[in-house]
Image (cartoon, rainbow, N blue to C red):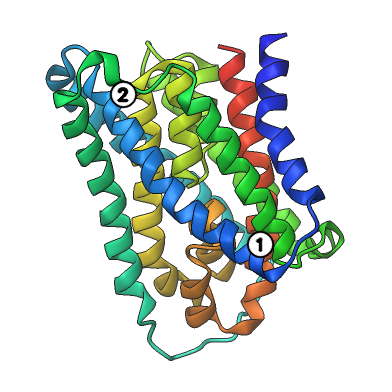
């Protein structure tokens, strides 16, 4: 029953966002609000992380978890889509124009890590009486999903357009299954990680703000930080290597962005692959953005 309630709390705001009549002004406000909310959420995660007893002794362990999970999830998704490209080649138009947004995006990713550090600093000096209420993360999660729903509706993308892109749908299925296999392998490597936890941690698909909240609520701040840094590493990796893989493995290049291929890494995808690859990235990213929260909540609710 609790898992059903949690799933409703996650999906209901997205449906509400889709139901709200969209206009350019509202979409712009939602996008702007989302960017600010992400920084606030990361600071909250930092605050919660600062309250973990003996955190200093767990840093090495956290780093190990993040390293192994990143290799397994990024590697599984990349390898599976490279095989897909080899079996069913799809040539994207190459654009030789260099991306100025590339370096800016990297700095933005570093700023996100900095927000967690600031949050930890605040958490160490903030009196217990002034700590955020227990349900703050759940409220932030609902607001986040609502803004994402408004943004997706305002983008003008219809579900029909997404599902009609056959290659985008195939990519999302292959990518999802491969990443989940990576999560299961992660659970096999670490005896303290159940198979459901391994699957839940792997299901962030690069959506670090969402995965960090869900995993913190389900397993505590330590595992929330593992999910956060795992998905941030995917973002770093995608920004650097999307142009590298785009010419020979366009599907794999798009898949590197995971959930961010719909928005954050889309400029890099477009500038390295040309306009031809954009519909593919939008279809894939849209589906992953819908699937990710469902899988995370379901698997974390199972234990």
Q: Toward the viewer: 223 or 177?
A: 223
Residue 293: image x %, image y %? 62, 36
Q: Which of 52/134 is in front?
A: 134
Q: For numbered disc 1, what is the local secondary structure?
A: helix
| Image quadrant occupied by the C terminus | top right
* Placement of 228 over or under 196, stated as above or below: below
Q: Which residue is mark 2?
A: 48
Say left or right for 253 vs 57.
right
Residue 72: x %, y % from top left: 42, 39
Q: Which mark is residue 10?
A: none
Residue 129 can be seen, yes or no: yes
Picture quadrant of residue 122: top left
Looking at the picture, does residue 133 appear above or below residue 85? above
Image label count:
2
* Residue under numbered circle 1: 26
**Does residue 184 appear anywhere in the picture?**
no
Task: Rate crowding at label 1 as few (under 14), some (14 to 19) or many (20 or more) other CA atoms within 10 Å.
Answer: some
**For discs 2 and 1, the disc positioned in front in the rendered view:** 1
In the image: residue 129, left or right of residue 289: left
Q: Which element is circle 2 on? A: helix
């Amino acid at each position: 029953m609790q898992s059903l309630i949690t799933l409703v709390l996650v999906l209901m705001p997205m449906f509400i966002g889709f139901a709200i009549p969209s206009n350019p002004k509202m979409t712009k406000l939602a996008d702007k609000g989302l960017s600010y909310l992400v920084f606030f959420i990361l600071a909250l995660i930092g605050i919660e992380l600062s309250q973990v007893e003996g955190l200093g002794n767990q840093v090495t362990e956290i780093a190990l978890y993040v390293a192994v999970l990143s290799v397994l999830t990024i590697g599984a998704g990349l390898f599976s889509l490279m095989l897909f490209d080899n079996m069913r080649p799809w040539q994207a138009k190459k654009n030789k124009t260099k991306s100025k947004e590339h370096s800016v995006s990297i700095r933005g990713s570093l700023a996100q890590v900095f927000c967690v550090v600031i949050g930890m600093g605040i958490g160490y000096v903030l009196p217990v009486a002034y700590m955020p209420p227990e349900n703050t993360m759940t409220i932030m999660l609902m607001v986040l999903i609502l803004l994402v729903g408004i943004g997706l509706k305002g983008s003008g993308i219809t579900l029909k357009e997404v599902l009609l892109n056959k290659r985008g749908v195939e990519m999302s299925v292959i990518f999802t299954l491969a990443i989940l296999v990576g999560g299961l392998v992660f659970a096999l490597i670490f005896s303290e990680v159940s198979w459901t936890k391994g699957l839940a941690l792997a299901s962030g698909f690069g959506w670090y703000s969402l995965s960090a909240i869900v995993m913190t609520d389900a397993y505590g701040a330590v595992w929330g930080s593992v999910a956060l840094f795992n998905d941030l590493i995917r973002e770093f990796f995608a920004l650097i290597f999307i142009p590298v893989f785009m010419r020979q493995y366009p599907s794999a290049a798009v898949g590197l962005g995971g959930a961010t291929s719909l928005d954050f890494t889309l400029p890099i995808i477009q500038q390295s692959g040309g306009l031809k690859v954009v519909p593919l990235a939008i279809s894939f990213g849209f589906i992953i953005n819908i699937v990710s929260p469902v899988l995370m909540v379901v698997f974390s609710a199972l234990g």
